Image (cartoon, helix red, strand yellow):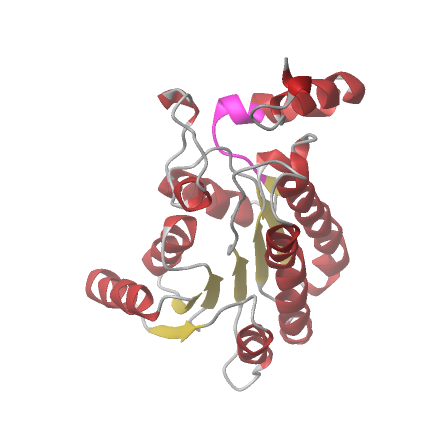
Amino acid sequence: MTTTVLITGASAGLGAAFARGFAAKGCALVLVARDKTRLEALAAELARDFGTVCEVLPADLLDPAGCGAVADRLADTARPVDVLVNNAGFGLPAPYPYSPLEDEERMLDLLVKVPLRLTHALLPGLRERRRGAVLNVSSVAGLLPTGTYGAAKAWLTAFSESLRIDMAPYGVRVLAVAPGFTRTELHQRAGMDVSSLRDGVWLEPEAVVAKALRDLALRRPVSITGRHYQAYAFAARHLPRAFVAGRMARKRRAPGDPAAR
C-alpha cells in the first residue's frame, strides 16, 4: 500500500526537501503552497527522478477558502492521506512590538491556527485506520524566549508532544521537527540580516529532513539536527530561565532603541 504524504509550504526550502525525502521512500505526495508554477516544477522533478505520483494543490493557507480546501483534502477518506507535514511559515524582520500588528497576527495564524486546523481535519481518518503520522516543523527558537516567532514555535512543539501521547494508542506517530538556522528562503523573504552568522551555524535542508525521518521511524518526540543545536537544547532545559530570558531580550532590541545600549 502506497503511503500518501501532504506537505504544506512544499515549493521550496524544507518543504521541498521533505518532498524529496518522502519521494525517495516511494510515497505519493500532495504538494501545497501558493505558487502553482513552482509546485508543478517540483512535481515534474520528482516524477522524473523517483517516479513519484504528485498531486499539486495550490492554496493560500491564510485565506479561509484556501485553508478549507486543504482541510477538505485531508478529511477525504476516499483518497486518504497518511502523513501530514505542517511546514508552511514565515518570520518577521523586527521583534515585537516593532512589526505591524497585522503581520504579527498573520504569522501567528500560519504557525499556530493553520496546523491546528489541518491536523484536526486529518486525525479522525488516522485514528480509524490506526496508522499514520503528523510532523510539525517547529524550531529551536521555541526552546527559549525568542519573541513571538519563538513563542508560536514553542506552542507547536508542546502541541506535538501532547498530541503524540494522545495518539499513541491509535498507532499514530507525531514528531516536532526543531531545526536551527537552515539554508532556506525564510530569512531572505523576511528581510532578516543574517550576514553576521558564521557558516558553522547553518544546516542544510536535506540534513534536517534525513534526521527527522530517522527520528520519526524511532518514534522520538522531537527531532533536532546538529550537535551544536542539540547542545543548545540541552542548555535550554538546564540553564536558569530568568538568566536566559534576560540575555534573549537584549538581543531582540530594535535598532536605535536606547535600551539596547
Q: Residue at x 72, y 55 (%)?
A: 163
Q: Is residue 151 left or right of residue 176?
A: right
Residue 230 appears at what percent x and percent y? 56, 26
Q: Residue furthest bottom?
A: 78
Q: Residue at x 69, y 74 (%)?
A: 124
Above-or-below relation of 245 to 103: above
Q: Residue at x 53, y 64 (%)?
A: 83
Q: Is residue 89 magenta?
A: no
**Which region is colored magenta?**
223-230
Above-or-below relation of 202 to 28: above
Q: Quadrant of the N terminus?
A: bottom left
Residue 91 appears at what percent x and percent y? 53, 45
Residue 175 appears at what percent x and percent y? 60, 49
Q: Quadrant of residue 37?
A: bottom left
Pick whichever, 11 or 133, lies toward us: 11
Q: Is residue 32 left or right of residue 162?
A: left
Above-or-below relation of 36 to 188: below
Q: Is residue 196 left or right of residue 80?
A: left
Residue 237 appears at what percent x and percent y? 72, 25
